[in-house]
Image: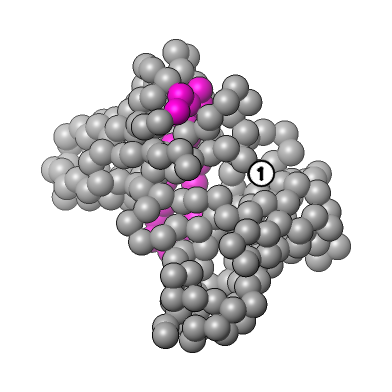
């Protein structure tokens, strides 16, 4: 099946710094990518939906100036956590949708990135 | 709003035991329902799905039936294997959009 990678898999940073997480679709073109956040023993929460070449659509309550999403190509989306604080520590998961519909049926998930902010 | 509730784990079974992981949902309209599986160190993978009432999704010996009257989509397997050890997520997709709404996940551990 289609493969989605995330880099890094784990990152530890100091409070106030920015962290960039990459999400790549390795063997298909992803017109739509999704970013989720997962707290321990909690559900995956959708943060934003990004379409290649256009601005991301953020879910209610997600600060777009804090979580910058760039979807510059059909195989790469990046999430930058700006001025990170300990409360931003979480597990961030991306998924990529193949095809033009962006339907959930064809979403392929990355393995996730564990962010720890000290 | 839309939500998914699934049984808390961990679920610990012996090989060849019967598995049930309960999942109920709250949604407006007619959502599509999914089960995803996450093996250690890997991303979520779609296990099965159902898009309308009474549909049964099945894959790799797992089954789940979309029950609108009980708003449930319980996952079952007649005989689990050690290789089934993973985290299982129930999810729904609102009829109107593409966003997935997930349950908290249930960890399954199967021993030989």
Q: Residue furthest left?
A: A14
Question: Is A30 in the magenta?
Answer: yes
> Which residue is found at the position 13% from the left and 43% from the top?
A14
Give the image location of residue A69, x and y in percent. 37, 26
The magenta stretch is A28-47
Q: Is residue B110 above or below residue A114?
A: below
Q: Is residue B75 left or right of residue A23?
A: right
> Which residue is found at the position 17% from the left and 34% from the top?
A17
Quick one: SS at disc 1? strand
Give the image location of residue A20, x and y in percent. 25, 32
Chief SS of the magenta region: strand
Is residue A65 visible to us here? Answer: no
Give the image location of residue B37, x and y in percent. 50, 58
> Which residue is found at the position 22% from the left and 34% from the top?
A19
Dot 1, crowdedness within 10 Å: few (<14), some or many (≥20)? many
Question: Is B8 in the magenta?
Answer: no
Name the residue tied to disc 1.
B93
- Please tell me in which quadrant of the rendered image residue B86 appears: bottom left
Q: Is residue B22 above or below residue A16?
A: below
> Which residue is found at the position 76% from the left and 58% from the top?
B56
Q: Is residue A41 left or right of residue A16?
A: right
Q: Considering depth in this image, is A84 or B96 the residue closer to the camera?
A: B96
Is residue B29 visible to us here? Answer: yes
């Amino acid at each position: 099946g289609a493969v989605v990678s995330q880099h890094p898999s784990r990152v530890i940073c100091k409070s106030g710094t920015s962290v960039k997480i990459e999400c790549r679709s390795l063997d298909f073109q992803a017109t739509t990518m999704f970013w989720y956040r997962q707290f321990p023993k909690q559900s995956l929460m959708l943060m934003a939906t990004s379409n290649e070449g256009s601005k991301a659509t953020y879910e209610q309550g997600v600060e777009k100036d804090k979580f910058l999403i760039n979807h510059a190509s059909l195989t790469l989306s990046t999430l930058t956590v700006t001025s990170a604080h300990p409360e931003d520590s979480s597990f961030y998961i991306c998924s990529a949708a193949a095809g033009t519909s962006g339907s959930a049926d064809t979403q392929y998930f990355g393995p996730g990135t564990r962010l720890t902010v000290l | 709003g839309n939500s998914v509730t699934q049984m808390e784990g961990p679920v610990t079974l012996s090989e060849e035991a019967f598995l049930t992981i309960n999942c109920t949902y709250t949604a407006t309209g007619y959502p599509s329902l999914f089960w995803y599986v996450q093996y250690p160190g890997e991303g979520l993978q779609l296990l099965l799905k159902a898009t309308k009432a009474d549909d049964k999704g099945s894959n790799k010996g797992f089954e789940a039936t979309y029950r609108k009257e009980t708003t449930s989509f319980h996952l079952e397997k007649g005989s689990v294997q050690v290789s089934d050890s993973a985290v299982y997520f129930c999810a729904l997709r609102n009829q109107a959009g593409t966003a997935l709404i997930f349950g908290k996940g249930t960890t399954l551990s199967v021993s030989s």
